[in-house]
């Protein structure tokens, strides 16, 4: 049945999994669990930096979906109306994908493979976008 994963989570011995099924979407619970499971100051610093990075990008992408021209007025000056419309759509699409990606990364938690995946994808997209903006004819 559809409730089977939730019933399995309720029967588990792990207190974190027992109280946190897919129903719980509060990110603070996962950050708190990572904080409590970390004993070193460097581990706690990594948790702060990683989740600050994620949530800053989630908020920035969410704002960018509604204000895609924010901070890019000089970029839009030399564009035709059609090109400006296409770039606006591209910016909204990138921000929409960004929100989804960073929410997915937040759900993955602060694990080595997840942190490596986040920064690899973020670096690849940044390099691609930098090349696209740099090579755009003025």
Image (cartoon, rainbow, N blue to C red):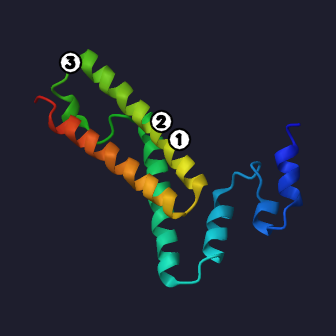
On screen, residue 61 versus residue 108, left or right, reads left
Q: Nearer the viewer, residue 74 or 95?
A: 95
Q: Nearer the viewer, mark 3 or mark 2?
A: 2
Q: Nearer the viewer, residue 10 or 33?
A: 10
| Quarter occupied by residue 71 | top left
Mark positioned earlier in the residue sequence (3 or 1): 3
| Quarter occupied by residue 106 | bottom right
Badge 2 local density, few (<14 within 10 Å), some, or many (20+)?
A: some
Q: Nearer the viewer, mark 3 or mark 1?
A: 1
Q: Nearer the viewer, residue 137 or 34?
A: 34
Badge 1 local density, few (<14 within 10 Å), some, or many (20+)?
A: some
Q: Are marks 2 and 1 in contact (CB under 8 Å)?
A: yes
**Which residue is depicted at the point 53% across and 52% down?**
105
Assign a secondary structure to mark 3.
Answer: loop
Which residue is farthest left?
A: 138
**Which label is found at residue 100?**
1
Which residue is farthest top?
A: 82
Residue 69: % across, % down: 32, 34
On screen, residue 45 versus residue 135, left or right, reads right
**Quadrant (top left/top right/bottom left/bottom right) for the N terminus:** top right
Mark positioned earlier in the residue sequence (3 or 2): 3
**78 relative to 12, above or below:** above
**Which label is found at residue 80?**
3
Residue 62: % across, % down: 48, 42
Q: CA distance from mark 3 to mark 2?
A: 24 Å
Assign a secondary structure to mark 1.
Answer: helix
Which residue is farthest bottom?
A: 40
Assign a secondary structure to mark 2.
Answer: helix
**88 relative to 80, above or below:** below
**Quadrant (top left/top right/bottom left/bottom right) for the C terminus:** top left
Q: Which residue is mark 2?
A: 96
Badge 3 local density, few (<14 within 10 Å), some, or many (20+)?
A: few
């Amino acid at each position: 049945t559809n409730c089977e994963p939730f019933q399995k989570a309720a029967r588990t011995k792990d207190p974190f999994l027992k109280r946190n099924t897919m129903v719980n979407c509060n990110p603070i619970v996962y950050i708190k669990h990572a904080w409590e499971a970390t004993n070193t100051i460097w581990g706690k610093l990594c948790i702060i930096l990683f989740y600050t990075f994620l949530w800053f990008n989630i908020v920035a992408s969410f704002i960018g979906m509604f204000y895609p021209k924010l901070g890019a007025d000089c970029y839009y000056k030399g564009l035709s109306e059609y090109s400006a419309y296409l770039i606006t759509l591209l910016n909204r699409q990138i921000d929409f994908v960004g929100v989804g990606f960073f929410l997915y990364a937040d759900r993955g938690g602060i694990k080595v493979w997840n942190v490596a995946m986040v920064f690899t994808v973020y670096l690849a997209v940044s390099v691609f976008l930098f090349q696209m903006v740099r090579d755009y004819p003025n």
